[in-house]
Image (cartoon, rainbow, N blue to C red):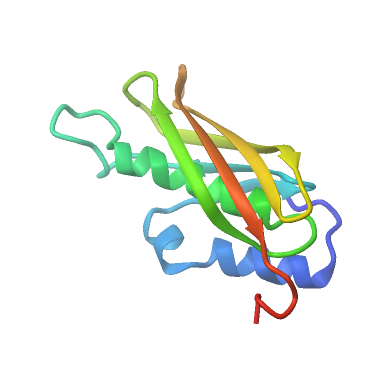
Amino acid sequence: MKKDLPSEVEERLRQIENAPYAIALKMETVSVGNGEAVVRMPIKGMTNALGNGHGGAVYSVADQAFALAANSDGDPQVALTVSISYLKPARGDLVARARKVGESRTTGVYEVLVHDSEQLVAIFQGIGYRLRKRESK
């Protein structure tokens, strides 16, 4: 569910949602708009040797939510720096909720909380760099 967005923003979000990597991982955009995004992803087939959700899978769904949130309001953004803290093993399908927590003229700061079906499993923080019109082409 997208909130009312300008057509250029909708097209940018469509490109992110339809990226081959996101499709391969079966990511589903639940909602996006105004610096926020929610993305769902199954972990079937993406487990580590212990049977838990692989850290790379947890990172991937967080990064997708970050990308959508960062690109949902205003100028295009690319990741400048990101970090993730893994809190507990993921044992079920993942839901990542991203939201903008700060911004400057050239950057946006986002927090992404990743839950499995029962608990918070990771906290991701990302800083997006705003591309100027000339840089985004």
**Image quadrant in which you'd find residue 74:** bottom right
Q: Where residue 82 sits: x, y (%)? A: 48, 43
At 13% from the left edge and 33% from the top edge, which residue is drawn?
49
The answer to whether residue 42 is seen in the rendering is: no
Q: Where residue 120 sits: x, y (%)? A: 48, 20
The answer to whether residue 43 is seen in the rendering is: yes
Left or right, residue 16 beside residue 85: right
Above-or-below relation of 121 to 48: above
At 54% from the left edge and 53% from the top edge, which residue is drawn?
80
Q: Nearer the viewer, residue 73 or 52?
A: 73
Left or right, residue 9 beside residue 136: right
**Image quadrant in which you'd find residue 121:** top left
Left or right, residue 36 beside residue 64: right
Q: Which quadrant, please, contains the C terminus?
A: bottom right
Q: Nearer the viewer, residue 55 or 100?
A: 100
Above-or-below relation of 85 to 48: above
Q: Where residue 98 sits: x, y (%)? A: 62, 38
At 67% from the left edge and 48% from the top edge, which residue is drawn?
69
Q: Where residue 13 sits: x, y (%)? A: 66, 63
Above-or-below relation of 7 to 137: above
